[in-house]
Amino acid sequence: MKEANGTDSALSTGSRLPLRAQAQAAGSRRADAVRNRGKVLDAAERLFARDGVERVTMQAVAKEAGVGVGTLYRGFTDKAGLALALLDERERRFQELMLSGPPPLGPGAEPVERLTAFVSGYVGLVAEQLELVLLSQTAAPGARFRSGAHALWRTHCRHLLDLAGAPSPGLRADALLAALSGEMIAYWLTEEGKDPAEITGATAGLARALASAG
Amino acid sequence: MKEANGTDSALSTGSRLPLRAQAQAAGSRRADAVRNRGKVLDAAERLFARDGVERVTMQAVAKEAGVGVGTLYRGFTDKAGLALALLDERERRFQELMLSGPPPLGPGAEPVERLTAFVSGYVGLVAEQLELVLLSQTAAPGARFRSGAHALWRTHCRHLLDLAGAPSPGLRADALLAALSGEMIAYWLTEEGKDPAEITGATAGLARALASAG
DNA sequence: CGCGTAAGCGGAATAGGTTCCGCTTCATGA
DNA sequence: TCATGAAGCGGAACCTATTCCGCTTACGCG
């Protein structure tokens, strides 16, 4: 079974996230491949920021990165996978805080507190990167659930729900994350005119409800 | 503001759903337009059933219906809108039962009972039409939230949650429906190997939790 | 250091959704 | 009944994502 991460394994490039081992296991044409992967991510980031995710074509990314389109598809399963890879990188910091930062997000606080802290932070992340998140969610159905990042969110929520004594923690973790999908948040933001703070507050309440034994 | 239903207003055709007034308000070239709409829906239904939603191209639908591609796009905003229209039709029966059928789905039962009955029925609907639902959810972000059908589900859930005394019934209705998205259910069905009955049971429990004051 | 091999590359070709626009045909009303 | 305006129609053209495949070239080995 493959990494199904939208990002044909191999973590990050060299220039971006300066320190980070080249890649991993298997082994060959890394020099070029790794360099190209980095060039692509840099190019995508730049173009997405400049023109908006929708308007950037894969051709454009390839050209900006100075590689052929084929190369894009060697490193990322599709456009959504490219978005996923970019997000993955940006979310890494939050993941670290969540796993080993200070409470209430990190270890040390009560499960419910950690959960609401997670929800708030997560909503912020999604809202900030909304375009990218929406793009990443156009992947093949279920593809996003298979990304390493998503697996981590899910495991974390399930764990906290479990500690809090909630029944069916796995299902509830899925439900909670579903309620925080890019599409849902975009809807609240644009159609309902809620602002991020409101969403954060409301969803934290939702998390609390899901964490109770009820 | 437009019907944003993925289906440029006008309800159903003539031949399908035999009885049903031609359409509504505004008024002209109905004869052909209405007939064509029906031909397209029939053709799509037939081809989707025969070849699977993914493999059917818009060209093929047009050809089967005996109209030009342009005509497809006159009546439906895009391929997802076509799916939405098909679903809308199939869901109508459930909607009627929900609004005026016998308890526990229809009026008469306790709110929480009605809600769990709704969830069970809804999950069944989604699971049955999974391909179509998934296609409909590839529409522009948020488009599905704007369909008449979705508005009805949402209103219904919110109402029941409200009656049950749950806080933030609107938000919880959204969260509940998000948990029942095609993508989520497809995931549980295929990746987790759950069967429909399991999903039904688990999500009914979720509904109960959301309905409690917690 | 020169080969052999296969990972990687580039970009033309493909495929299918969506748009555009000139041509038809319906429906109205004189 | 016929003229007329506009709703609808058809399908070619367009735009992009994605695939394919023959060519390059980094790398390990003798």
Image: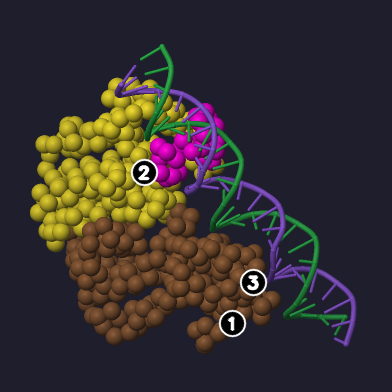
Chain colours: A yellow, B brown, C green, D purple
Q: Quadrant of residue A45?
A: top left
Q: How many marks?
A: 3
Q: Residue A6, which numbered label?
A: 2
- Local packing at callout 3 (Cα closer than 10 Å; few below 14, some 14-19, many 20+) is some
Name the residue rendered at 47%, 58% in the picture.
B139
Depth check, front residue: A82 or A182: A82
Q: Which residue is mark 3?
A: B67
Q: Position of residue B128 (x, y in %)?
A: 34, 72
Asked if A82 appears above or below A166 in the picture, the reply is above
Please tell me which of labels 3 and 1 falls first in the chain: 1
* Residue A64 is covered by the magenta coloring: yes
Label 3: which secondary element: loop
Amino acid carrying label 1: it is Gln
Tell me the quarter of the image containing the N terminus of chain B. bottom right
Q: Quadrant of residue B120?
A: bottom left
Q: Residue B22, which numbered label?
A: 1
* Residue B3 is covered by the magenta coloring: no
User: Chief secondary structure of the magenta span?
Assistant: helix
Name the residue rendered at 23%, 68% in the picture.
B195
**Parent chain of label 2:** A
Q: Residue A122, which numbered label?
A: none
Q: In whole angstroms, how far apart are the C-alphas of marks 3 and 1? A: 20 Å
Residues drawn in magenta? A57-81
Amino acid carrying label 3: it is Val
Q: Is residue B38 left or right of residue B28?
A: left
Q: In whole angstroms, how far apart are the C-alphas of marks 3 and 2? A: 38 Å
Amino acid carrying label 2: it is Gly
Q: Position of residue B106 (x, y in %)?
A: 30, 81
Label 1: which secondary element: loop
Q: Position of residue A83 (x, y in %)?
A: 41, 41
Asked if A105 appears above or below B113 in the picture, the reply is above
**Parent chain of label 1:** B
